Image: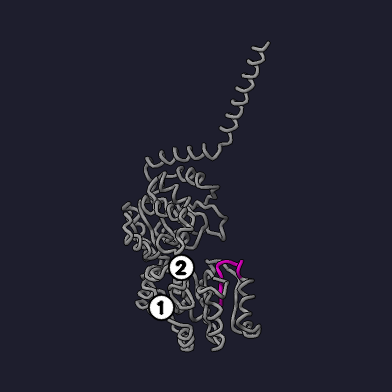
Amino acid sequence: MVGKANDKNILDVVAKILNRSKTILQVPGKGIRKLQAIRNAKQAFEQPRTANHAIFVCHQVNVRAIKLAFALKTSGWQITLLHKDNLPYDVSEYFFETKKIKDRWDALNIAAKYSPVIYHIFSNYNFELAHVFTKYKPGKIVFDNYDLLTGMFKDETSITDYTSLEQYCYIHADGICSRDLRIQFLKKLNYKLPEKILFSEYCWPENKFIRVPKLTDGIHVVYVGSIEPNPDSPVGYLYELASHLSKAEIHLHIYPSHSIIIGLLKINMLRFLTEDTISKYVHIHDTISLLELRKEISKYHYGILISSKTMNFGDDNETYFEHMGGYFLPSKFFDYFDAGVFTLSQDARFIRFIIERYDGGCVVNSFEEIVEICKKSPIAISRPSSLLLESNASRLLRFYEQL
């Protein structure tokens, strides 16, 4: 009886194991999905490439990805978009198809079903997707990093998990697509990098986003982008800027990238200006679609592009080292150019080169200087053909094809 009981117990255990295995096979866990994705990526790497096809992969779709897709589409390419976050707006005009991914292994598994000329991976402070694609390549990988953390962030010790992944992606990608000159700093640090291309965000064609007439009830200055709401921070400069401009009866329009700080921004502004002054000269707008932004701000005259109360990256900047100013080129620069807004910029090497070459702005060194320039008659800005997306698309295609 004892033996039979033991036999029965053993059979029960075996049956449970078999049932559990069946369940695992039906609903793959992360470990199994990982192995499947890696295997599929390896098989995909051996497949012949589909001409004129690229796959864009990103957590959150930003305007840079949309602009690059537009540039490629004008050259007859089809772009498949794999994205994790919900799409902030309709992008069907720019992509042949879009697919929402669950995580990095889902992305790799879906990507392996295709055989494009290139997989173009976009990162913005999150390198998990890029790391998986550069490690388990389903094809040629281009790494496109929105910001360089390594060697630029002062408190790099707090983000070592991010920088280690970032460095891996830079070294192991087949190519690097850079929006500014920050990649040059990695070369100074003696990183061995693959082929690279400087491909900024450039300007839309003139018929894509029509400009509206300029306002005529005074001078209007605009700031677009991320905002430090703390007025005591060295980079919380908008309050002081608003004070200087309003005293000269110049309007300031603020378009925050993130709506969550709008309430705090309005409250803090009352520490510096009266409600009457704010209602007349300081206009804090709701966050709007980045695809609508250029047309919206084209009615203004001047655009602000500075990093702190002292204008530049300096010892007082809490985030970046001073040398950041020699390499960066923010996306808002091309927003201003697109909108025909004269850029008032800090003394940053790359920005200075472009605005001087195309008469698109000037360097400023103080709030007082900003006010003095704004008192003058606004200067009309055109879109130079060499800064248009379609004028640069062929460079990106040649880069893809040489990898």
Disc number for residue 331: 2
Figure quadrant of the N terminus: top right
Q: Nearer the viewer, residue 191 or 299?
A: 191
Indicate the amino acid at tag 2: Ser
Residue 158: percent from left, percent from top: 49, 58
Q: Secondary structure at mark 1?
A: loop
Q: Which residue is mark 1?
A: 360
Indicate the amino acid at tag 1: Gly
For the rendered model, the colour scheme is one colour
Q: Nearer the viewer, residue 112 or 36?
A: 36
Q: Quadrant of residue 42?
A: top left
Q: Which residues are magenta?
A: 253-261
In the depicted structure, whether residue 286 falls above or below residue 24: below
First-in-chain label (2 vs 1): 2
Q: Quadrant of residue 260?
A: bottom right
Q: Is residue 334 left or right of residue 289?
A: left
Task: Give me the residue at 61% from left, 83% from top.
Answer: 273
Residue 36: percent from left, percent from top: 48, 37
Query: Does residue 204 appear in this view?
Result: no
Q: Secondary structure at mark 2?
A: helix
